[in-house]
Image (cartoon, rainbow, N blue to C red):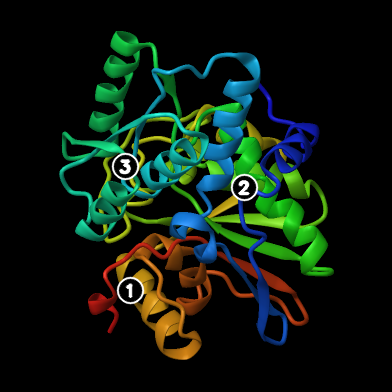
Amino acid sequence: MTVSLDDVQRAAERIAGRVRRTPVIQVAPGLTFKLELLQHTGSFKPRGAFNRLLSAKESGELTGQGIVAASGGNHGLAAAYAARELGVPARIFVPVTTPAAKLDKLRTLDADVVQIGNEYAEAYQAALAAREESGAVLVHAYDQPEIVAGQGTVGLELLDQAGTFDTVLVAVGGGGLIAGIATALGDHAQVIGVEPAAAPTMNRALQAGRPTDGPVGGVAADSLGARRLGDLAFEAVQNHHVRSILVDDDSIVAARSELWHQYHLATEHGGATAYAALVSGAYKPTAGERVVVVVCGANTDPSTLT
């Protein structure tokens, strides 16, 4: 199923008033940050979660059984937050490796939290089984049309807020965010996916000609830890000629440190991954190129910022 610009625009109307219109700041000539780390629950994820739940409510799919979701942390926070706001129960499956900072926040959102497996994929299988048993609505972390369309509202805001720009750097895990942004922007700007070299879902899919499973590792695995790119994301990145750039763990750590020390932005490693492309020189803008970096996640232990 293809996600269209119309889908993104309808998502924007549906979730209006439920999510924050996050700010953009020009931090240097030709460099702008889109601060999605200031979104509810500390990442862009509530956009897709609200669109999925509100769409399910409109269709009658959302019942008293509530929702189930699997997550490395951020999607679970968003799904639990949206469920609480809409007054339905949420059961969230997370890997045992989920950082304590995210677990603590999940529990404040009245979610039933189940830790299982070492990776997102294992938590997802448990969520599927729970959905079959209970009849709850499954809220996928990245590969549902409503999720992709909701995340695409970041792109619509950029068009309205950031003036003219040439390039947008976006971190990639399962691909919901980059799929939505690429769909929203169309030919207005080039979209580049920045991936941890330890979990290159999009890069691997583009090389293979289809999404394929692979190992998950690295410092950003708790938020960019999908084994494979979503089918919807693969279609979107092909349709919009999105290319991939890989960054290593040292570059991600350095970018996170610079975001904190230079801009006072406390990000998780996944939230710093897009900026790592610039810090490391993996992406070098041309003279006069106007670049937007989506800073997408803040759920971290502040004591680890060095």
Residue to which mark 1 is pinned: 253
Which three-letter amino acid code belongs to the residue tagged 1?
Answer: Val
Q: Residues within 10 Å of mark 1 (few under 14, many from 20)?
A: many
Give the label, 1 or 2, closer to the camera: 2
Q: CA distance from mark 1 to mark 2?
A: 32 Å
Residue to which mark 3 is pinned: 110
Which three-letter amino acid code belongs to the residue tagged 2?
Answer: Arg
The kind of secondary structure element at disc 3 is: loop
Give the label, 1 or 3, closer to the camera: 3
Residue 177: image location, x then y, percent: 56, 47
Which three-letter amino acid code belongs to the residue tagged 3?
Answer: Asp
Q: CA distance from mark 1 to mark 3?
A: 32 Å
Residue 7 visible somewhere in the drawing: yes
Residue 232 visible somewhere in the drawing: no
Work out whether 10 lies above or below 74: above
Q: Residues within 10 Å of mark 2 (few under 14, many from 20)?
A: some
**Residue in view at x 82 percent, y 55 percent:** 188
Would you identify the image quadrant in which residue 131 lies?
Answer: top left
Residue to which mark 2 is pinned: 18
Q: Is residue 60 left or right of residue 156?
A: left
Work out whether 32 lies above or below 132: below
Q: Is residue 57 left or right of residue 186?
A: left
Residue 251: image location, x then y, percent: 37, 73
**Residue in view at x 27 percent, y 45 percent:** 216
First in sequence: mark 2 vs mark 3: 2
Q: Is residue 259 left or right of residue 97?
A: right
Task: Using the image as rendered, state which of residue 117 and residue 248 is in the foreground.
Answer: 117
First in sequence: mark 1 vs mark 3: 3
Q: CA distance from mark 2 to mark 3?
A: 18 Å
Work out whether 153 lies above or below 287: above
